[in-house]
Image: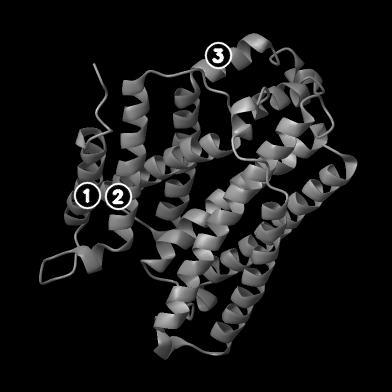
Amino acid sequence: MTVSEKNASTFAIRTSLGAAALFEALTVLATQDKPVRAVSPWQDDPYDAAVSLAMFAVPMLAAVVLLRLPVWRAPGGPDRAQQTARAAGAMLALVALTLVAEWAAVVAGAGHPRWDARTAALIGGLIVNSLVTGGAAALLWRGRAPRGSAARWRHDWLGDVLLLAERVPVLRRWARPEAAGWVRRHALTVFSAASAVAALAITGSQALGEHWTDPLLIAFMLAVEFTAYLTFCLLTNAVAGFVARPPRSRPRRAAETSLIAGALATHLAIAFRNALWPGPEPLTSVPAVMAFTFGAGLAAALATVLLPGGRPRR
């Protein structure tokens, strides 16, 4: 990679981080400020399902991109540039999908009787955010790596974590190749633990903020958040190569694909539950919502395994 290409890649990544920061600031305002949320077109599902996920997932991706910049010039520069650009691309893709959901809410006139001057300001922010995100995405696309280059990667983000840890005296004793090897062999366990921590934090804050007292509702929220972030970890790792996982058996790959399909179906069922529910009355009780949404997820997971091409060969 030439100096000019490296500078262009760095500029594209920093522009992406700026777009993500703008998105996060506007999203926090629209979701956490109660008077503003009350006049937001995208405050309810299905639009809010995308907003809620992105509000937590986008900062996670931005954080790992920022943490990699201090080791930008370490050995493995071409791999690092490609992987970081792909992580930034995944971040922008999540932002873009959320912006599409917000535009859909505006076009549909969701909650129009409640709109006021603050709604106009939110829509103005949506316009600016869309332009900035589009520009950042164009920069990343222009500097994209050739197709198939990911197959030649020899470095991952975990190796950079070791480089950073070696600079901190307290962490230096833990920055061992053996530890990195264990993480690579047990990546699914690590992703599950991280997803559980995120799910507990988000569910706990939501339960306290909304004064939930129903244990079933809290358990439902916890399960939904856990599957969402585990799927998020698996998909973004496949895109950006955070952890170089060793080859896995075909049945295990099929099981992970089934998990991802089930989680995505569950979240789509949650977002569009009232439109998809065939009954005469909308879903209101927690047990009914759980049965319907997790039932859709289970059906999708089983279909992924049983359909031709998904069933592991003997």
Q: Amino acid at mark 3?
A: Trp
**CA distance for labels 2 and 1:** 6 Å
Q: Residues within 10 Å of mark 3 (few under 14, many from 20)?
A: few
| Residue that badge 2 annotates | 266
Q: Name the quarter where the N terminus is drawn.
A: top right
Which residue is drawn at the image coordinates 50% and 37% (left, top)?
233
Numbered badge on residue 118: none
Q: In the displayed image of the protein, which residue is found farthest to the top? A: 178
Q: Out of 162 and 12, give the one closest to the viewer.
A: 12
Confirm or deny contact between disc 2 and disc 1 (CB under 8 A). Answer: yes
Q: Residues within 10 Å of mark 1 (few under 14, many from 20)?
A: many
- Residue 282 as seen in the image, left or right of residue 99: left
Q: Residues within 10 Å of mark 2 (few under 14, many from 20)?
A: many
Q: Amino acid at mark 1?
A: Ala
Numbered badge on residue 182: 3
Task: Say which element carries label 3.
Answer: helix
Residue 229: x %, y % from top left = 45, 42
| Residue that badge 1 annotates | 296
Which residue is drawn at the image coordinates 67% and 22% (left, top)?
154
Q: Height in image: 222 above or below 45?
A: above
